[in-house]
Amino acid sequence: RIEREVYLMTNDGDIKKQWDVEEPYDVRRNNYPLILAGGDLIHLNYKGNIARYDNNSSIVWKNENLGHHDAGYYNDTLVTFSRENVFSDKIGRLIQDDVIKQLDPDTGEYTGKNVSLYNVMVNDSNINISELYEENLLQGREVENGTIKSGQYRASNDSIKLFHANSITVLKKDYGGVFEKGNMLLSLRNIDKVVLLDWEDEEIVWSSEIDLDRQHHPTMTSDGNILIYDN
């Protein structure tokens, strides 16, 4: 294992706080960290583990094989992504689903409910899974003759990363319309979409219609617009 550093910085670029966090192997990047109200750090490493570190960089708890890319804070619980393989009869193959799970921030244990993004999408009459697969993976030649060519889309030899959720932002206030406090802004990289999830009703209430390409980290601005890193 190696150590990586996570920094809390001022607007002037000065380091205010540093945490030394563990990585399972030498990687070039960390995922998005989250700072809790008391100053502890929630860190997600590249292998897919989520851990809580105290102010002295000691591990309070660690949940392995859960938590990738990002985490949010919802009604005194943590929400993060878990990966699960399911067979999609819509496209006729095994896919890697992104499931949002709630964790107790004090223990790292499961609490509350889980929401499968695949189930939400399939049950939405406005979303066509087959078309999304066709437009973003087949036409882009990421999949040819049933073979997954790109490692960015391959979960295993047989399973494809249909969504590859890479960001979750829990809205902290009402912005108007469906952009209500508690709804979750999600980035789904592999289908070039940003969507808004109503967690309580388990439904997509808004979806981006602009041309995106493997985007990351959409966030709400103070005036209610959405800032997206379209890379």
Image (tube, rainbow, N blue to C red):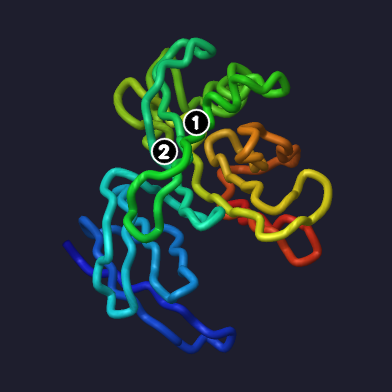
Which residue does the image show at 53% across and 50% down from the upper left? 167
Q: Nearer the viewer, residue 152 or 31?
A: 31
> Which disc is residue 116 wearing?
1
* Callout 1–callout 2 Cβ contact below 8 Å: no
What is the quadrant of residue 148 in the picture? top left
Disc 2 is placed on an element classified as: loop
Give whichever of discs 1 and 2 has the lower sequence position: 1
Q: Crowding at label 1, few (<14), some or many (≥20) Cα neighbours within 10 Å?
A: some
Which residue does the image show at 38% across and 48% down from the upper left? 67
Q: Taking 206 as reference, is 117 left or right?
A: left
> Which disc is residue 189 wearing?
none
The residue tagged 2 is: 152
Residue 168's x, y, as percent? 55, 50
Residue 189's x, y, as percent? 54, 41
Disc 1 is placed on an element classified as: strand
Of tags 1 and 2, which is closer to the observer? 1
Q: Nearer the viewer, residue 193 or 123?
A: 123
Extreme-left residue of the structure: 1
Q: Amino acid at mark 2?
A: Gln
